[in-house]
Amino acid sequence: MAQILVIDDDTSLLQMMSIMLKRAGHTAITASDGREGIKIARNQHPDMVIVDVMMPEMTGYEVCIALRKELVTQDIPLLMLTALSQPEHRGRAEDAGADGFVTKPVTRDDLVKHVDELLRSGARNFPDFSGLPTRGEDQAPAAEVPSPPPGFEAAPAPAVPAAVPAMPAVPAVRAAMPKPATGPLSGLPLVVVLGLGTGTGATTIAVNLSLALIQYGRTCLVDLSHSGGQAATHLRVAPHGTWQNLLTFASGSDKRIIAQALTMDHPSGVALIAAPQAPVADRLSAASLHYVFRALAEGFSRLIVDLPLDMDATSIATLNEANHVVLVLGNDPADLAGVPNMVQTIDALRLPGQLHVVLNHTRPHGISYETAIQTVNAPLAVDIPYEPAQLDSVSSGKPLIMSHPASLFSRTVLHLARFL
């Protein structure tokens, strides 16, 4: 089973915890102070750390902060053990990076319940320790929107205020759905975002991922909805063109056709190929998609596709071009009925790219983490929390990555972006 590090200055408690964990099938490693525990965590990288709050020299809060800050230990799940049960202590534990909180005296059943839960979910709480403030528009420095990629020969974009603050460092994702064993990847920097049902917030994730990935280079968001796509609404831009401009694009085509489809005047610098507002009978063929994506990859470090739920030929061709496929599961219980069939359909495609299932909380209350895992029969890459400011971010045209960069939602999306 799991190897679990327990840090506490009380030797009798260390013995008791070791026995509890051993009876639950785990192996316990013990440390009698914070510094010794951090050293063991660095060298042995246990599956979990349980740390007491009240210790001499170095508190449990300080231990959690140190483990979260170090690259080699920042992805270890952290469980805080303390006799202090007041809400302010729980909040302080969360601020320090703890994923769970158990009050002493702890029973074996309560301990095992928390341990098993964190072993399933992995580390989930990654505070921003940089002290980065949320800046308003009046504090943001001026910057130019990037011009179109070389060879597209579009007119240079005007100077506009930058609105995206520097992205905080985030740890690598701990768990992800295994990649099917198929042929070689396309080599494209292509990330497809697909909702496992209606109302999952897949467009919200796609838009915010586009902004999160800017820290790694220029990004282009492609909304392949059949009509009335919402990506332009989220970014609050008037599209200069749509994917309809690219229906005839093929090998050897003039790249200025791409420029006609690109919208590049969003303050963040992210480029957009929007969906048509009116329904279009034609669809992009597999050959057209192949050349469009390769042409875009010459000028952008990441391509993010917001893919509609319909599994038509265009969708399947896009999925087969992707290096990464983000499958978005919503937390509304009413939308779960068709999810297993959708997952089976995707599995049957034997896609070459890496699959990542994420749980997106579009409402304050809904299905649990455990229910999500049972529904998709696969581990989750990340669990994206509900953010009440989401509606305001859409109406303002400033996605949460821009308007609330320090929120848990934004930090979780940044966490996912690190793995793409």
Image: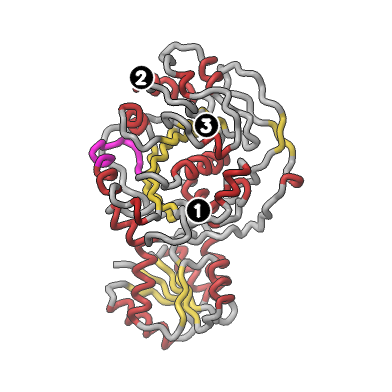
Residue 73 seen in the figure: no
Residue marked by disc 2 = 287
User: Could you tell me which quadrant the C terminus lies in?
Assistant: top left
- Residue 391 image position (x, y, % from top left): 56, 49
- Tell me which residue sits at (65%, 19%) in the image: 155
The residue most toward the bottom is 12
Q: Is residue 202 above or below residue 331?
A: above
* Label 3, label 1: how far apart the Cα atoms are: 21 Å
Q: Tag 3: residue type?
A: Cys
- Tell me which residue sits at (50%, 33%) in the image: 221
Residue 375 falls in which quadrant of the image?
bottom left
Residue marked by disc 1 = 412
Q: Is residue 342 left or right of residue 368?
A: left
Residue 305 falls in which quadrant of the image?
top left
- N-terminal label among 2 and 1: 2
Q: Is residue 354 magenta?
A: yes
- N-terminal label among 3 and 2: 3
Dot 3, crowdedness within 10 Å: few (<14), some or many (≥20)? many
Magenta region, residue range: 345-355
- Tell me which residue sits at (44%, 43%) in the image: 202
- Residue 274 image position (x, y, % from top left): 51, 29
The residue most toward the front is 278
Q: Residue 220, which numbered label?
A: 3
Residue 389 seen in the figure: yes
